[in-house]
Amino acid sequence: MAEAEKLKEELFRKTKSGWECTEDDKKMKIFEFCDSYIEFLNNSKTEREIVKSTKKLIEQNGFKNIVEYEKLVPGDKVYYINRNKSIYLAVIGEDSIEKGINIIGAHADSPRLDLKPNPLYEEAGLAFLKTHYYGGIKKYQWTTIPLAIHGVISKPNGENIEVCIGEDESDPIFTITDLLPHLASEQMERKLKEGVKGEELNLLVGSIPYGANIAEAVKLNILKILNEKYGITEMDFVSSEIELVPAFKSRSMGLDRSMVAGYGQDDKVCVYTSLRAILNIEKPKTTAVCIISDKEEIGSMGNTGMESHVFDTFVSEILNKLNVNRPNLLDQVFCNSKMLSADVDAAYDPIYSSAYEKNNSGYLGGGVGLNKYTGARGKSGASDANAEFVARIRGIFEQNNIKYEVAELGKIDIGGGGTIAYILANKGVDVIDCGVPVLSMHAPYEVTSKFDIYEAYRGYEAFYKS
Ligand code: MN
Ligand code: MN
């Protein structure tokens, strides 16, 4: 019997919780790290805010805008901001860049509700803002919760007005109403998918009329308030990007404080961990690059999404400033490069166990999650990492004692999802998805394990140093 146990120990894949072998001093480091992470989340709920917080953090750590450099040498730290919504960072390595770069790529955008271009209307003495949801959400989750308004309003004269209402304790918040159960017997017959419809996600923003016997007086009063505060008129909404995000704060979760609950952890948890990792990199052997992209949740399209060529332009600019560029070198660099596509993974939820396949799931506390491939139903649309590359990444993690687990996203015929992995793979980069497992992904309040967050950070750092 004892021999069988010994043999098991030797031969079986280890599936224990990471907390089991976490000593007190490491636990303290994990908790400290996650306190900073929670603070970061609370200060950056949108992609624009992420870019702003990132710029501040990296400038304090020696990064400079690439335009400030005429030529680059090993150890230089540069960044490029793409239209205030995505950012690329690099620490120049000692080795020839022709041998490739080490990339970690996360995304700053998260599911939310965007305002429509003509959002404001009044009905029954109430003023509302119409929304168009962004990314894959369960719409019913976004009603009857406190929401905050974040974003920018751009004016033709070049003025960019930043808006943030609902975060300060003294601010008002906003909400989307839902029908009381007493009157919801018809609504309750709807399928959950249509329980709340897209056109029902209208934000309640006011109820005081500007004067008596005036048509649309509540709408007028709202516009008057906005005009006084921001100098805008109704037409200015057309050139705005206003996002509604949960107004509540990220917090430590559980009696044992082992988890983080917060909005937008997909994919801000990977943004924060990869950023913290690259801050530890001084004069690496291989050039270290961190991508914080936009529009991942809606297919990575547009000039701030990963499908655009702006990242290629950034790497080309590095080649130019290293004085090594020549035709086709960029393609060669990509073909020799390695990447962790840092995006969250679906954690196994025992309440909904039928959606998962136990043997191939990521577990909260199981460490950083590797997805060899995503896709669904016959690996359709999957970027499938090569065995050799998986072996390399495993090797790095095992050498550095980083706890990881390898998972699929749910059951074969149920699951599915994509990340930015395939976009870099198309350029010839060796890529694997590598991120933190999340419960309630895409919900207004997502849950992660502090252990996994810390292992992601350590794993990313080890990858950069490899
Ligand atoms: Mn994601
Ligand atoms: Mn997502």
Image (tube, helix red, strand yellow):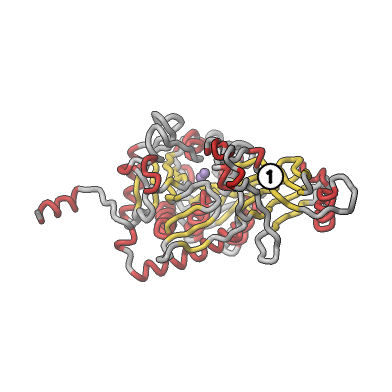
Residue that numbered label 1 is attached to = 202
Residue 289 coordinates in the image, percent (x, y) = 51, 49
Residues 133 and 242: in front is 133
* The N terminus lies in quadrant: bottom left
- Residue depicted at x 35% and y 51%: 404
Q: What residue type is labelled 1?
A: Asn
239 above or below 173? above
Q: Residue at x 70, y 60 (%)?
A: 172
Residue drawn at point x = 67 percent, y = 59 percent: 166
Q: In the displayed structure, would residue 171 be above or below residue 147?
A: below
Circle 1 sits in a helix, a strand or a loop, which is it?
Answer: strand
Residue 2 showing in the rendered view: yes
Q: For label 1, count other residues whose C-alpha is less than 10 Å away and answer few (under 14), some (14-19) or many (20+).
A: many
Q: Nearer the viewer, residue 100 or 201?
A: 201
User: Looking at the image, which is closer to me, 14 or 118?
Assistant: 118
Residue 99: quadrant of the picture: top left
* Disc 1 CB within 8 Å of nearest ligand 2 atom: no
Residue 326 found in image quarter? top right
Image side of residue 122 versus residue 384, left or right: right
**Residue 92 shows in the view:** no
Q: Nearer the viewer, residue 196 or 312?
A: 196
User: Total number of numbered labels?
Assistant: 1
x and y, in percent, of residue 282 in the image: 48, 60
The picture places residue 18, in percent across and down from the top left corner, at 33, 58
Instruction: Name the quadrant containing residue 190.
Output: top right
Question: Which residue of the protein is positioned furthest toward the front in this rendering?
Answer: 182
Compared across the picture, whether 187 is left or right of 83 comes to: left
Residue 212 screen position, x and y as percent: 89, 52
